[in-house]
Amino acid sequence: MRIPAALPKTIVIGGGLGGLSAANALQQLGLDVSVYEKAAEPKELGAGIVLAANAMKALDKLGLGEQVRQMGSAVKKAEIRTWDGKLLVDLPVHEQAKQYGTYSYLIHRADLQSILYQNLKPGTVILGKKLISIEQGSKISAIFEKEEVVEGDFLIGADGVHSQVRRLLVGSTPLRYSGFTAIRGISNFDDVRFPIELGGGFEAWGHGKRFGFSHLGKGRIFWFAAINTPEGTLRTAQNRKKTALEHFRGWWGPIEAAIDSTKEKNILIHEIFDRKPIKSWSQGGAILLGDAAHPMLPNLGQGGAQAIEDAIVLSRCIEKNPENMQQAFRDYERMRIPRTTQIVRGSRVMGRFMQLENPAAIQFRNLLLSTMPGSIQIKRLDWLIGYEV
């Protein structure tokens, strides 16, 4: 079924992955969609984002999967090692790709946003619009700075972990610090152990910290470090490269060299947070999507994927009930809240597993990983990356 162009007018708050995915999905139904982003200009900052098989299948449904494959880098090597290089796991990525019909891909977040943006109708995204409040009646109004008002039939809050729409709909729910801070960098770097033709990379796990390295596409690599530290400890570091090098001095293989190859301006430090899952994402004609609805830790690599899945499911629910938005929202929540809640919780559990500090617990974890058959490695994440939206 195709929705008539006159029904309904959609306001999307937030021009990140979730908002752009929602706009793509809804424009494909014929809806009139406008995306309002508070940033005054497009940002090229960002880091690598992994898109597992479930995310790639979702992008295929938007008609964008092949562009991502061309611009990104297939993950054809994925190892987990100890801090000093002992191989614990060589993930069966080829078997996974055969089973799920696609490799996972790593791509620069800015490149993915560009693909989503360029697929929209010209003029869809309006920059420099900071949302202040929402008013609901027979229509829904978004009030921006300088008292600018935009009226629509419904509104999607896709404005990220610090969502103003979420605060207006469900009130303030506290951020939960993960216990670790992330340092992330992008560089041009070569290492014979991980040639660009192979793609993918590795993670090395140590005592309360870990380091990951992977190819990103366009001849670049992406690395990240996750360091257990009290909140507020690292975020104000003046020299980000020096800070990363101090934490990973003497670690295995290309780690120090990858950090050292990275320009200071291409290194980011962020404390990592999520929020406790909530049971409702909507109020009246407004609904949440992506990190605004279910901010999650990055330990399962699913933040972007779940925003894209949200966008597709919401568009289907609206297509099914174009004249009953309340029913469409209820269907969307029923289909999405259980899955995203499971991932939020699973990401927290995985974080504790990855960031262990106790030597005996680390030894047991490493023994468990090194003896786990490949078939079990695939099966334990089948519910997550084998999922097709």
Image: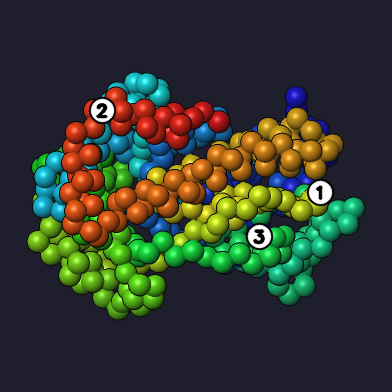
At x 82%, y 63%, the residue is 135
**Kind of element beneath mark 2:** helix
Circle 2: residue type = Gly
The residue indicated by pointer 1 is 153
> Is the C-beta separation of discs 2 and 3 under 8 Å?
no
Q: Does residue 224 appear anywhere in the picture?
A: no
Horizontal arrangement in the rendering, residue 175 relative to residue 192 (left or right): right
Q: In the rendered view, tell whether residue 238 sits above or below residue 289.
A: below
Q: Earlier in the sequence, mark 3 or mark 1?
A: 1
Q: Position of residue 153 (x, y in %)?
A: 81, 49
Quadrant where the N terminus is found in the figure: top right
Q: Position of residue 80 (x, y in %)?
A: 22, 43
Circle 1: residue type = Asp
Q: Residues within 10 Å of mark 2 (few under 14, many from 20)?
A: some
Q: Residues within 10 Å of mark 1 (few under 14, many from 20)?
A: some
Residue 198 picture quarter: top left
**Kind of element beneath mark 3:** helix
Horizontal arrangement in the rendering, residue 272 relative to residue 209 (left or right): right
Please name whichever residue, 210 or 310, is drawn nearer the observer in this view of the structure: 210
Circle 3: residue type = Arg
**Real-space Cα distance between discs 1 and 2?**
49 Å
Front tag of 2 and 3: 2
The residue indicated by pointer 2 is 374
Q: Earlier in the sequence, mark 1 or mark 2?
A: 1
The residue indicated by pointer 3 is 166
Q: Earlier in the sequence, mark 2 or mark 3?
A: 3
Please name whichever residue, 350 or 158, is drawn nearer the observer in this view of the structure: 350
Quadrant where the C terminus is found in the figure: top right
